[in-house]
Image (spheres, rainbow, N blue to C red):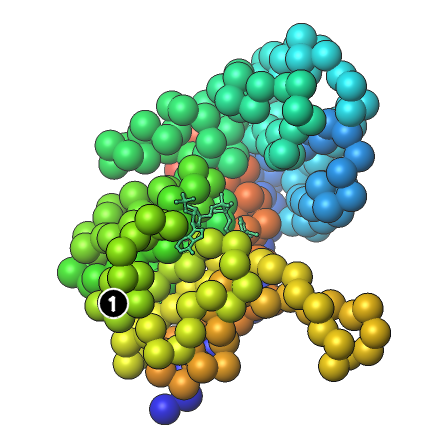
Amino acid sequence: MAATVIDGKAFAAKVRGQVAEHVARLKEEHGITPGLAVVLVGEDPASQVYVRSKGKSTVEVGMNSFEHKLDADTPEADLLALIDQLNNDASVHGILVQLPLPKHLDEDLVINSIAPEKDVDGFHISNVGLLGTGQKSMVPCTPLGCLMMLREHHGSLSGLNAVVIGRSNIVGKPMAQLLLGDSCTVTIAHSRTKDLPDVVRRADIVVAAVGRPEMVPGDWIKEGATVIDVGINRIDAPEKGEGKTRLVGDVDYASAAERAGAITPVPGGVGPMTIACLLANTVTAACRASNLAEPEGLTA
Ligand code: NAP
């Protein structure tokens, strides 16, 4: 039976709509306009695209967008001074430093200098600790988006076997924590995992966050499992013409869709949810900053 396609684009539009409604209420009832500051250091083309798209999406839901573009050779002290200024600016509720940073900058130091309550990427060590201990935190956007889609599809995740392939700090590890928080039995697989096909075949939920095009074939997928494909890989597509490329995930979509119960496509699955969750985190941060009720369903 063909899998249900989990439409991340449509889901993300719904989340953005909920964020926009909440922003309108915050403005009308409390005179608060949530603000997101995005800091870009250098001219990495992919990062420039991401930052532009984040700014545009922020404005579209009625929030303030503050973009700070710094030269690639900006001294660390100057970047830290800017973050300090944003930490102390009451009109800024969320701060995001676009990664990767140029080599001379210490990423951990920079991320950990953001006020944890404004850390809408959820990468600050305090937020990592809060998530790991099941406390209220800012949750990394990509795994949060995956969790929202899983909850929407399954209702309760309690007792399901979940396998997360990949143990990065930005996707794999927080994803595993979130699934554990929803009472899944969680396995984290990585490049040293023995007999990965066998591990994946036991999963009711597979989250692939590896960065290897179409690495997970359909015959690793248990009949009826839910497959969340985080991977975004650009590969050559000679069938589209010379020099053309296309995006694929970490899962071989065609064969996996024959066995899975539900699956996210690439593009149009996890990707659109990431920015939607960034907006959700910013509105959540704005509510928390003023001790107001948080919007329901927009955080873990
Ligand atoms: P990463 O930091 O490179 O981590 C990749 C993980 O995959 C590592 O833990 C690595 O294991 C594991 N791995 C590598 N080869 C493997 C293999 N053969 N078998 C099993 N595990 C293997 O990547 P990431 O930042 O988590 O990103 C993963 C993918 O998600 C990328 O394609 C990225 O573009 C995409 N992504 C998408 C979004 C989105 O918005 N949709 C957001 C973030 C990332 P070791 O730890 O043992 O090396």
**Three-letter code for the amino acid on which mark 1 is drawn:** Asp
The image quadrant of residue 271 is bottom right
> Which residue shows up at 36% across the image and 91% down it?
1
Front residue of this view, candidates 34 and 40: 40
Q: Is mark 1 within 8 Å of ligand 1?
A: no
The image quadrant of residue 45 is top right
Is residue 158 shown above or below 10?
A: above
Is residue 116 shown above or below 141?
A: above
> Which residue shows up at 53% across the image and 17% down it?
109
Residue on which disc 1 sits: 198
Q: Is residue 21 left or right of residue 127?
A: right
Q: Is residue 20 left or right of residue 46?
A: left
Front residue of this view, candidates 128 and 293: 128
Residue 122 appears at what percent x and percent y? 46, 34
Is residue 236 shown above or below 98?
A: below
The image quadrant of residue 47 is top right
Residue 24 appears at what percent x and percent y? 60, 45
Q: Is residue 61 left or right of residue 219?
A: right
> Which residue shows up at 27% across the image and 62% down it?
195
